[in-house]
Amino acid sequence: MSALTTAGDLRRLVVRDLRREVRVPDGLIVNTALPVIIMVLFVYVFGGAITTGSSKLDYIDFVVPAVLLMSGGYGAALTAVSIAEDMTGGMIDRFRTLPISGWVVPAGHVVASVIRNLVSCAIALAAAVLLGFRPDASPADWLLVSALVAAYILAMSSLAVLWGLLVRSTQAAGAFSFIVLFLPYLSNGVVPSETMPGAVRWFAENQPITPVVDSLRALLLELPIGSSGVRAAAWLGGFVLVSAPIAAVMFRRRTAS
């Protein structure tokens, strides 16, 4: 099978997923609105009681990176439901009859998820600006922010595809979205980790979401990034390198059965 044929198959599957999202936009609306509602709640209800660790840093500036990850991550996690629907519905029979590579269908879900959720993050960022967020990022910083958010969505989408292939129902697949939405709360995203009790603080400082949050915050606000960028890239790259090939193998096995 030629590279051009494979690329054409991938394009068609991506378009299929995006068209389905346009026809039934509920998921896009929810994963955009939910983080924005959470941001409004924290900024206007809890923000005055939460310290950011710096008198020069407003709470909305502190929390926006976490909101971006909630928006992109929650939507990416719903990819598990999409592929589970394919595996448990009639689409699996069509995939068995098509001369396509085993990795193309999972990859189509992932690429569509990245495109779809970058749009969600852009909407969430626009809402943050309306609420008072004032980034100091340079054009180069904005490119890095976009790349980092895309990498995060890519990593979460790859894990979501793997989860959707592991479970046997769409209900179980949906549980992954709650895990991804909850993790930013146990990071440096909503409150500084220094304010957390011992064991929770240790987890928050060493889990994969924290360096991504810290890197986004540094890029958006022109703060020193330190080692956060390298750690974020290592975590996200590791997730993709581990989950993507396993998902491709699992898809081939399930479609062969």
Image: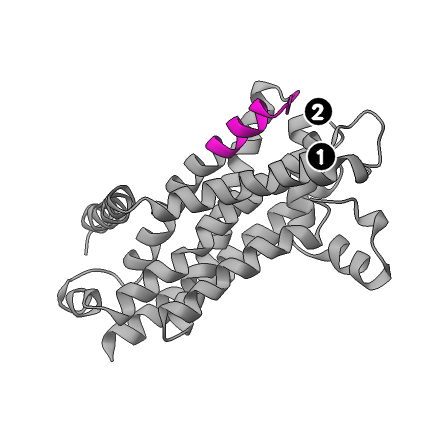
* Front one among 92 and 242: 92
Q: Does the magenta segment cover residue 135?
A: yes
Badge 2: few (under 14), some or many (20 or more) residues near its Cα, within 10 Å? some
Q: In the figure, 191 relative to 175: above or below?
A: above
Give the x, y percent position of residue 60.
Answer: 68, 31
- Residue 55 lies left or right of residue 68; in this view the side is right
The part of the image, by quadrant, that contains residue 54 is top right
Based on the picture, tell me whether residue 158 belongs to the magenta stretch: no
Residue toward you, 23 or 42: 42
Mark 1 is on which residue type?
Answer: Phe
State the residue lying farthest toward the bottom.
Answer: 257
- Magenta segment main secondary structure: helix
Residue bearing mark 1 = 62
Q: Name the residue at 34% across, 66% down.
A: 84
Closer to us: 234 or 123: 123
Of the two numbered discs 1 and 2 on the same chain, state the one appearing first in sequence: 1
Quarter holding the N terminus is bottom left
Residue in the picture at 24% in, 76% down: 256
Mark 1 crowd level (few <14, some 14–19, many ≥20, 10 Å Cα): many
Q: Give the residue displayed 42% in from the left and 66% down from the top.
A: 173
The residue under the point 61% across, 56% down is 182
- The residue that disc 2 covers is 222
Front in this rendered view, residue 116 or 158:
116
Q: CA distance from mark 1 to mark 2?
A: 13 Å
Which mark, residue 247? none
Residue type at mark 2 is Glu
Q: Which residues are magenta?
A: 122-136
| Quadrant into which the C terminus falls | bottom left
Is 196 on the left-hand or right-hand side of 217?
right
Q: Position of residue 189 (x, y in %)?
A: 69, 44
